[in-house]
Image (spheres, rainbow, N blue to C red):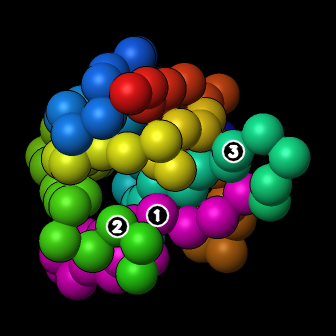
Amino acid sequence: QVQLVESGGGSVQTGGSLRLSCAASGIIFSINVMGWYRQAPGKQRELVATITSGGSTNYADSVKGRFTISRDNAKNTVALQMNSLNAEDTAVYYCKAHRLGRHYWGQGTQVTVSS
């Protein structure tokens, strides 16, 4: 099993920045892709960004140029630096890990952007 714990959410004004972190524990070897997803009220959960163990990244079009995903394989952590935040970024953000064909989710952290 893989356990994921997110931190770093909170409230910020439009144009501000937040940094989310996710720490993986448990059976963590062979974790390939880690990523961030988000779910706004009344909407489906959507991909924000992913990163492979080799460092290849993928971003949703809506966050390209504003968000940066990074990973520390030695510490088993993944981070999401979010800049130029706007109201549309308000959501619960979830960390996800892929390991040997299984997906694992964190409990989520709330990000609220207000004007």
Q: Find disc 3 in the rendering and name its residue.
A: 40
**Amino acid type of the residue that numbered disc 3 sits on in the rendered structure:** Ala
Q: Secondary structure at mark 1?
A: strand
Please provide the residue range marked out in magenta. 45-60
User: Which residue is painted at 27% across and 74% down in the image?
Assistant: 64
Q: Is 113 situated left or right of 38 in this image? A: left
Q: Which residue is mark 1?
A: 48
Mark carried by residue 21: none
Residue at position x 53%, y 38% in the image = 90
Kindly tell me whether residue 71 is visible in this rendering: no
- Per the image, the residue denoted by label 2 is 63
Q: Are marks 3 and 1 in contact (CB under 8 Å)?
A: no
In front of the other: 57 or 14: 14
Structural crowding at the residue carrying mark 3, measured as other residues with C-alpha within 10 Å and reported as few (<14), some (14–19) or many (≥20): some
Q: CA distance from mark 1 to mark 2?
A: 7 Å
Residue 54: in magenta span: yes
